[in-house]
Amino acid sequence: MIKVLFFASLKDLAGVAQVELLFVDGGRVAALKQALLQAYPGLAAALPTAIVSVNRQFSFDDDVVPDGAEVAIFPPVSGGSGWPTLCQIVHQAVDMDAVVAQITQPTTGAVCLFTGIVRGKTTRGVAHETQALEYEAYVPMAEEKMRQVADEIRQRWPDVQGIAIVQRIGRLEAGTPTVWIACAAAHRDTGVFEAARYGIDRLKEIVPIWKKEESGWVEGEYHPQEGD
């Protein structure tokens, strides 16, 4: 049995401040995260970037969780001057309320959110129907390039505050959301609409993500330029 403590936004998403959890002695932090995700699905968006401590020591996915441990789950400690940025490749469905909560501040008054969806019927170009798409990503590079896109957005629209770029991979049926670009700012006239549009266009240019239709993999035409 271990004690799990939730703090800040993780506490809000879990709906509890602490819980006693039956966990295999010697199990690892990665397994604990999966157990928590099953028990508290609302943690899905925040858990990948959460910090874990075991018996008041920072711990990582391969670290062992001993029986009787006190485990704390919390977001990165506040204190920097930078705005929040969330860039993730995920396999599971995404709670967009939780994502938006992570990028908003007391000064936020507007969030522009773009969502891409698996299109079941295509009428532009060669008309066809799609039952499902298979999405694949070179995850470490994809998340790094997502952060680059976020940096580019802030260079062009300095009034944009929080940014979230989230891509779901795996087999996704028609009608399923696949990608989310969210830009937050104090007001709606500060560039959030243009920033979100730029974000999805740029993602499709430089972030290594591919989709496979029934007829095969869909490849783009853009080749990275110097500086991409």
Image (cartoon, rainbow, N blue to C red):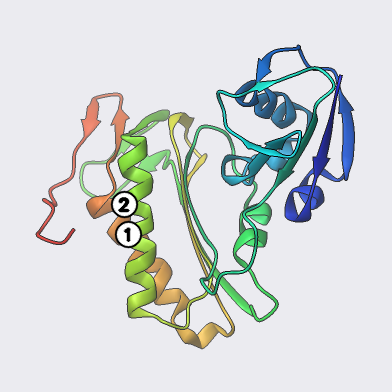
Q: Residue at x 21, y 48 (%)?
A: 125
Label 2 Cα neighbours within 10 Å, binned few <14 / some 14-19 / many ≥20: some
Pick the residue in front: 62 or 187.
Answer: 62
* Residue 184 x, y percent position in the rendering: 55, 72
Pick the residue in front: 196 or 40.
Answer: 40
* Quadrant occupied by the N terminus: top right
Instruction: Specify whether 35 is left or right of 189.
Output: right
* Residue 135 x, y percent position in the rendering: 37, 32
Q: Residue at x 69, y 13 (%)?
A: 26
Label 1 Cα neighbours within 10 Å, binned few <14 / some 14-19 / many ≥20: some
- Mark 1 and mark 2 residues within 8 Å of each other at the beta carbon: yes
Residue indicated by mark 2: 145
Pick the residue in front: 124 or 228.
Answer: 228
Dot 2 falls on a residue whose secondary structure is helix
Asked where in the image residue 136 lies, by quadrant, the reply is top left
* Quadrant occupied by the C terminus: bottom left
Disc 1 marks which amino acid? Answer: Gln
Pick the residue in front: 225 or 212.
Answer: 225
Residue indicated by mark 1: 148
Instruction: Specify whether 227 is left or right of 199.
Output: left
Instruction: Specify whether 58 is left or right of 156.
Output: right
Disc 2 marks which amino acid? Answer: Lys
Residue 110, placed above or below residue 138 = below
Asked where in the image residue 147 lies, by quadrant, the reply is bottom left
Q: Residue at x 63, y 59 (%)?
A: 102
Dot 1 falls on a residue whose secondary structure is helix
